[in-house]
Image (cartoon, rainbow, N blue to C red):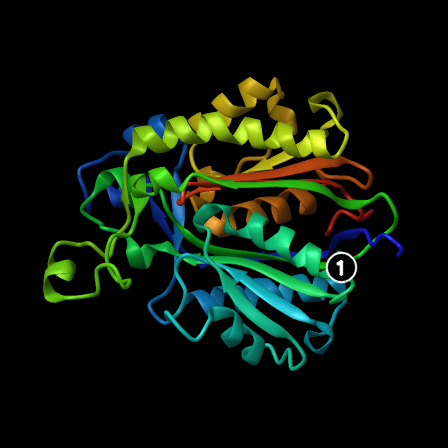
Amino acid sequence: MKKIFVGISGIGSYLPEKILTNDELSKMVDTSNEWIVERTGIEQRRIAEESQATSDLAIEAGIRALENASVTPEEIDLIIVASSTPDYIFPSTACIVQHKINATKAAAFDMNVACSGFVYAMATGANFISSGVYKKVLVIGAEVFSRIMNWEDRNTCVLFGDGAGAVVLEECDQDFGILSYDLGSDGENGDVLIVPAGGSRTPASANTVNDKLHSVQMDGKAVFKFAVKTMGKSTIKALDKAGLKIEDLDFLVPHQANTRIIDSSMKKLNLSKEKVYTNLNKYGNTSSASVPIALDEAVKEGRIKKGDNIALVAFGAGLSWASIVMKWNRGDTNG
């Protein structure tokens, strides 16, 4: 059986127009621009309008990726939406996207691996193509984290923002596209990053709402330690599977969570800043959307060229991690 190589044929992203700066946040909670920038590198973040749900952001990013790939919605075989903030428990946000973009032939499902979700979803979508089941897959990472924030908790509310990013996956030229991936989890420490209520373990009640248990809770030190340890290790594993060394890596797009995490992780990999893309100063942590948004911007800025060996790496609740190594298969600078 002929080996099918899978690459990105189109890419797009969407950020809500509303900007929430650190100075504006300092009027809502006990913090300051200097405190936030020093500890996170974040200067501002985007906030969805009250009328916007996760599917609305996902649709915008998805349409842009389809246009970039010159693919019509009717050609898409599968839609995967990675999100921790779906419109509803069910139906899936992917099904809402499928209907609203008129992808009439597409199967659709959601994937919740928190901030690792997009990379997990991309690996999943690629396997559907490489196995010969589907030809064109739309993968979207979309979040409206502003809806699950405790805006009185300065340790979490300063970190996150809203946004969406998407890619179209298709067969590409031999020896290009996705070369390998590394996925993993550590469920033993799942409680260090959690939204405690709203599921079957702790259903919604007056008490859970009053106690703000439907908001993100995080042990920042534990997450930091996990992230620094995991991001470099997962990247190396994926490179090994691809038969590559760190010296062969041309560019890395990490999950945009915290500049100190990124800097510490990249120091372990001995990567120069020129090879690492960051944009969290503008958007904060957009969870599963952060990697595709950053990848989209890096491509459009001409930072990634055809034939470059690139890596995507993320970590998140679960605890989870994911990385992908690919040889960039597009020759233009707009995707």
Q: Is residue 40 left or right of residue 178?
A: left
Image point (54%, 35%), residue name = 278
Q: Residue at x 58, y 48 (%)?
A: 119
Relative depth, front residue between 312 and 164: 312
Residue 73 percent location from the top left of the image: 68, 75
User: Label 1: few (<14), some or many (≥20) within 10 Å?
Assistant: few
Q: Quadrant of the N terminus?
A: bottom right
Tell me the element at label 1: loop
Residue type beneath disc 1: Ser
Query: Does any portion of residue 259 appear in the rendered image?
Result: no
Q: Is residue 132 visible?
A: yes
129 up-or-down from 117: above or below: below
Q: Nearer the viewer, residue 28 or 62?
A: 62
- Estimate the x, y position of residue 180 in percent, counting from the top left: 70, 41
* Residue occupying the point 63% across, 49% down: 296
**Residue 223 image position (x, y, % from top left):** 36, 33
Tell me if residue 332 comes above or below residue 247 in the rendering: below
Question: For mark 1, what is the residue?
Answer: 131
Against 269, residue 188 (above or below) is below
Q: How many marks?
A: 1
Task: Name the quadrant containing residue 27.
Answer: top left
